[in-house]
Image: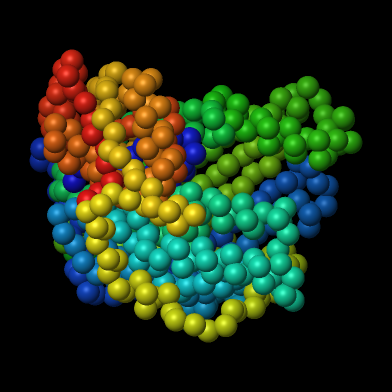
Amino acid sequence: MTSLYWKSFASACLCVTLSHPAWSAGGIEIPGYAPATGVERSYRVLKATETDMSFWFDKPGASAMTMRGAFRQRMTVLSRDEDGMRVRWSLSADLPEGIAGLADSYQMNLLYRNSLTAYGTAALELETDLNGNPRDLSGVDQIVTHMREMAANGPGGVPAAGESGVYDIIAKLEANPLQIIAALVPEAQLLATGQSYQAETMEIGQASATSRDEDYGGVSVPVTSTWTLESTDATARTATLSLSEEADAAAFSQSQQPAIANLISGFAERAKNLTADQLASVKRASKSRSVKLVVSLNDGSTLEASEIVTVASGGTTLRTYTHIQREDMPASLQLPTVLTAKDLQTPDLHIEPLPSSKVGPGILDELSIPPAPRKASQTVAPDNDEPKAIAPVSLEVKSAKVVSAPTSFGSELDIMLTPESAAKFQDFTQAAVGEITQVLINDKVVIEPRILTPITGGHLVISEPDSKLLQDMAEQLTLPEAKILVRLRP
């Protein structure tokens, strides 16, 4: 499947095609992801965060904090066609049976229950690509409306203050609805990491590395990713893959300097006594990610995933742990102690449940109704309810080249627009936020992305595992008369 994502610093959640490297012949074939439709799958999810601030605090109780959660989430692939899938996640903050330790040591469940209350839903319906990566979300308007009502009728009937940050969160969700998925069901993205819509052949023990750039506050940070097929189990019909990622230390440190400066100012008295070496250490930052994935050799689905993300910055270390296991399959990955410990010291937090709003029509009921098709007239209704036409724009190409995909093992077509077209494209995307659009090359639709935020810079990328197809597009776009047409989807 061909997919496109806009390279925009304003948008953090981008849907791209993920695939595994095409290893040499004679290896193990990992089948393409082909999930059964209409079958509900249950997943056990364990999460934990560890925060270490011992550099700044002398008292052990103040220097370290651990939180964890245990969940049972359910997923159903509702439909699948040649372009993507529609997936429903049913969400719950309830503790599953058989968890280790006392219930009150799972404070994330209390926080997650408040999140479900604030968002006003216990289910999400997603449109995904054929790998399972979320690319669109139904019911965004209902969710945002509910959050605004929650803010306007805060605890005790007192509206949330404008400076409380609640409205900033709402604005970010309106600009990029995929952040709702990141907040409520990040498991969808982690499971998709191990899935590829087309079969790949891999050799045990052979590693393949690639790199990409991630944006952190306007700083471009190179990230190196290394994939390895660790082992296979012929009886269970599974393959175990590993993914390790490392951010460039110098660039990541640069990106974190504003946050580090704020932290140092918060501990001004202690910072005065730091040696030059200690101060230099505080100003360094690093980020790494380690993932293990157990993938079915029957249908290419991820059956189990374990992820550890470590961020060290400003003398503090934050480590997050996630483990997902499909309940109908036995666990095979080793779990960190923090996820299974019966006795775990957790912070003394008092988490008040958010009051539920009055009962009304269920969002899940509304999501289950297919959205009405867009009419042929390409108009949108702005806030003043006066229809505003959004005309298609023809864009001129400055350069087009095929490069290695930074977030996968396929290829990408890297397109840079001319300055005049970049300005036209920015105006178009600003008017079309929230709308589904079409991108045409030589009158052929190559992708239909939803505009999540205005796109600046005139830079866009088409991701596609077929490098020959991308090369053909690149050659077409290098012709003097080459143009790209972008319009609202009819």
Pick whichever, 264 or 311, lies toward us: 264
Q: Position of residue 268 (x, y in %)?
A: 85, 35
Q: Residue at x 54, y 69 (%)?
A: 146
Q: Is residue 237 left or right of residue 393?
A: left
What is the count of numbered marks? 0
Residue reaching furthest left? 26
Is residue 188 at all visible to an observer of this figure? yes
Question: Is residue 13 placed above or below 134 in the rendered structure?
Answer: above
Is residue 193 at all visible to an observer of this figure? no
The image's colour scheme reads rainbow
Q: Position of residue 284 (x, y in %)?
A: 64, 29
Residue reaching furthest front? 386
Question: Is residue 176 placed above or below 328 in the rendered structure?
Answer: above
Residue reaching furthest top? 480
Q: Position of residue 52 (x, y in %)?
A: 69, 48
Q: Is residue 274 left or right of residue 209?
A: right
Residue reaching furthest bottom? 359
Quadrant position of residue 333: bottom left
Q: Residue at x 89, y 36 (%)?
A: 269
Pick whichever, 111 or 431, lies toward us: 431
Q: Position of residue 196 (x, y in %)?
A: 23, 49
Question: Is residue 410 placed above or below 96 in the rendered structure?
Answer: above
Q: Is residue 260 left or right of residue 426?
A: right
Q: Residue at x 38, y 20 (%)?
A: 419
Q: Is residue 87 left or right of residue 290?
A: left
Q: Residue at x 33, y 40 (%)?
A: 5
